[in-house]
Image: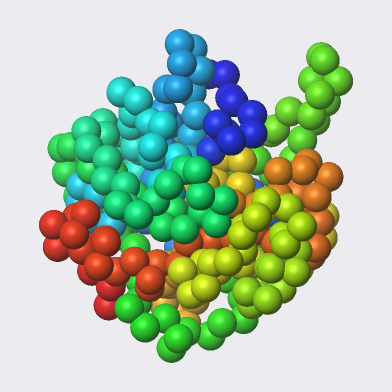
């Protein structure tokens, strides 16, 4: 399967805290932390041209709905699929299920031509339904996420974690076979605006509908190419809540390894509770 670069490269995110599954911690691969809940993170491959497949991240909302980014969903073509119940894209378990996507609901106010990336959120509907079990579960998110400890977040995904030169001496992305995770610091909007104000106009004029993060270790790459639509979590009292989904970040390869200077930006779920309820016909709701 040929992977696409840049905006067409997206990611995934599923499976358990197995000591054999690597994760990114402080810029290195290591066994995934058992505190990382991977069960609600499906893998979403989608063809974009003959022999070309893009992948993206998402979150399981209901037995037949997945949450992802609108900028990914808008270009999906048939047949597109989701996979749940596995952390290894080359292996399966008895609970691993593949389903075909048959409907896409974009936020009505999303525009791919708006540089602020407002309302970058979408819901995919698939069939037949999946059953919940020890390896498949729906994500939880709050209407009032101010109750959560806004200091650190956890990212999960199978997207790009490094680059390497190809035969043309260009930098190509390298995605992971296994689920990766990373701990990030959450930062405020003013920090984001100070970073992106000289790039595309209005990039961080996102108010309460966006979140910004940066990795503690500056050598750890952003989860953008291959992770669009994937979840950002906060853990409180042993419970995991999704607070955001991956929206955008720097497009300069060198800057991707300086997350301390060039943070990633996420769509804030608590700002879109009404959309999620409507798009899932009430099957998914903010708590």
Q: How is the image coloured?
A: rainbow
Q: Position of residue 228 (x, y in %)?
A: 52, 46
| Residue 251 is at least partly visible in this image | yes
Residue 283 visible to the viewer: no
Residue 178: percent from the left, percent from the top?
57, 42
Report the residue at 45% width, 11% height from top: 50
Q: Position of residue 281 (x, y in %)?
A: 13, 57
- The residue most toward the top is 50
Q: Quadrant of residue 146?
A: bottom left
Residue shown at 51% from the left, 18% from the top = 52
**View extreme (front): residue:** 201
| Quarter the C terminus occupies | bottom left
Seen in the picture, residue 233 relative to 133 is either above or below; the reply is: below
**In x, y percent, where is residue 68?**
40, 49
Q: Is residue 50 above or below residue 177?
A: above
In the rendered image of this protein, does residue 261 appear above or below residue 163? Answer: below
Which residue is found at the position 37% from the left and 83% from the top? 144
| Lateral position of residue 94 relative to residue 171, left or right | left
Say which residue appears at 62% left-offset and 58% top-offset: 203
Q: How many marks?
A: 0
The extreme bottom residue here reads: 147
Left or right of 222 on screen, residue 93:
left
In the image, 145 versus 95, the foreground residue is: 145
**Along the line of sight, the residue nearer the viewer: 234 or 104:** 104
Left or right: residue 22 compared with residue 227? right
Foreground: 74 or 232? 74
Residue 261 appears in which quarter of the rendering? bottom right
């Amino acid at each position: 399967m040929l992977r696409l670069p840049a905006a067409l490269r997206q990611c995934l995110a599923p499976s358990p805290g197995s000591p054999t599954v690597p994760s990114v911690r402080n810029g290195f691969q290591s066994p995934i932390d058992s505190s990382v809940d991977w069960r609600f993170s499906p893998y979403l491959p989608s063809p974009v041209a003959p022999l070309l497949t893009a992948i993206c991240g998402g979150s399981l909302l209901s037995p037949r709905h997945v949450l992802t980014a609108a900028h990914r969903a808008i270009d999906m073509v048939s047949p597109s699929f989701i996979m749940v119940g596995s952390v290894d894209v080359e292996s399966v378990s008895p609970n691993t299920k593949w389903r075909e996507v048959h409907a896409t609901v974009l936020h009505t106010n999303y525009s791919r031509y708006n540089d602020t990336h407002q309302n970058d959120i979408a819901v995919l509907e698939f069939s037949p339904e999946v059953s919940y079990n020890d390896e498949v579960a729906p994500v939880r998110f709050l209407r009032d996420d101010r109750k959560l400890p806004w200091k650190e977040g956890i990212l999960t995904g199978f997207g790009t974690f490094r680059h390497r030169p190809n035969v043309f001496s260009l930098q190509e992305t390298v995605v992971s076979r296994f689920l990766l995770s990373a701990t990030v610091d959450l930062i405020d909007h003013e920090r984001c605006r100070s970073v992106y104000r000289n790039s595309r106009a209005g990039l961080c004029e996102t108010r309460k509908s966006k979140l910004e993060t940066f990795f503690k270790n500056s050598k750890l790459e952003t989860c953008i190419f291959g992770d669009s639509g994937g979840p950002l979590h906060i853990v409180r009292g042993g419970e995991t809540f999704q607070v955001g989904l991956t929206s955008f970040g720097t497009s300069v390869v060198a800057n991707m390894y300086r997350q301390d200077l060039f943070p990633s930006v996420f769509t804030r779920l608590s700002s879109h509770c009404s959309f999620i309820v409507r798009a899932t016909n009430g099957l998914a709701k903010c708590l």
